[in-house]
Image: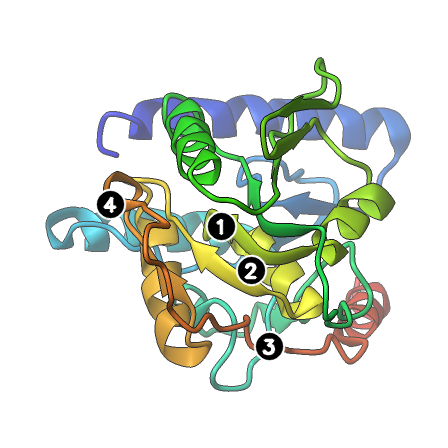
Amino acid sequence: MIKQIPKFLNAIKKENEIAEKIAKEHNIDIIISDNRYGFRSSKTKNILISHQLQIVAPIIIENILNNINHRLINKFENCWIPDTSQTPNLSGRLSNFKNNKIIHIGPLSRFKSPIQPKTNYKYQYIGIISGPEPHRTIIENKLIREFLKLKTKCAIINGETNKLNSKRDNIDFFPHQNTEDFKRLIEDSEIIVCRSGYSSIMDLSVLQKEVLFIPTPGQTEQEYLARYHSKVSNIKSMKQDDFSLENFNYKLGKVKEIRNKKLLNKALEICIDNP
């Protein structure tokens, strides 16, 4: 993390230069930046969307990182948190930072309604691959190895755009899916196996499917969210190195369901009415 700080700050500087140029050329009034700390302009009102207001890290550097994080957040006129202010929420202590710039806009998801349970599923497990290498390939290989041991059908969405549907024994493989096709595959699957990233958690809060989390090793946010939802949502998680479905008989939970309640519309009204 310490080694990445100069690279991170350099990226912020470049983003700021781009934002300034765009704001000037197109006479922009408001910039809404999706977790891009540098994408703001001196010529506009600037809003940051982020759930990670408190960085989870080893104690020795956590305070340093959060001091930097809070200074960057305070450069924006508002910070929209894609979560609720109620307790428990979806992001736990990650969004536990309060000042007069904070507005909760509710969880954001491309999905609108829960998936209705079935009595018969096409797939017992569906694995959703995401994240950086080498762990992306590691978890895909582990899923394949574990799924091949089963007598039931399974599926894997690898998220890649340059591949076609394929099949290997009892496993169906799918590349990147549009929202409608993705939801259809989820509907056809009994249990989801995926990372515990916050975007996935917001989607799962809507979909209400049983899930098994495997956080990306070394990503402290995912590791924290997996622990947090083991408590508030009763969701089982496994370390990547320990992942196995042999004799797997745990009762799996669903991510706590939280409705948006049109909080985003309210946030937009506040920002437009208070230029």
- Circle 3 sits on which residue? 84
Residue 32 falls left or right of residue 245: right
Q: Quadrant location of residue 115?
A: bottom right
Amino acid type at mark 2:
Ile
Of 247 and 243, which appears nearest the observer? 247
Label whose residue precedes the other's in the sequence (3 or 2) = 3
Q: Give the CA separation, mark 2 to mark 4.
A: 22 Å
Quadrant including the C terminus: bottom right
Residue shown at 46%/70% (left/top)?
252
Q: Give the CA separation, mark 3 to mark 2.
A: 13 Å
- Circle 1 sits on which residue? 197
Amino acid type at mark 3:
Thr
Looking at the rendered structure, the secondary structure element under dot 1 is loop
Residue 119 falls left or right of residue 67: right
- 171 is higher (above) or lower (below) than 166: below
- Circle 4 sits on which residue? 242
Amino acid type at mark 4:
Asp
Looking at the rendered structure, the secondary structure element under dot 4 is helix
Q: Give the CA separation, mark 4 to mark 3.
A: 33 Å
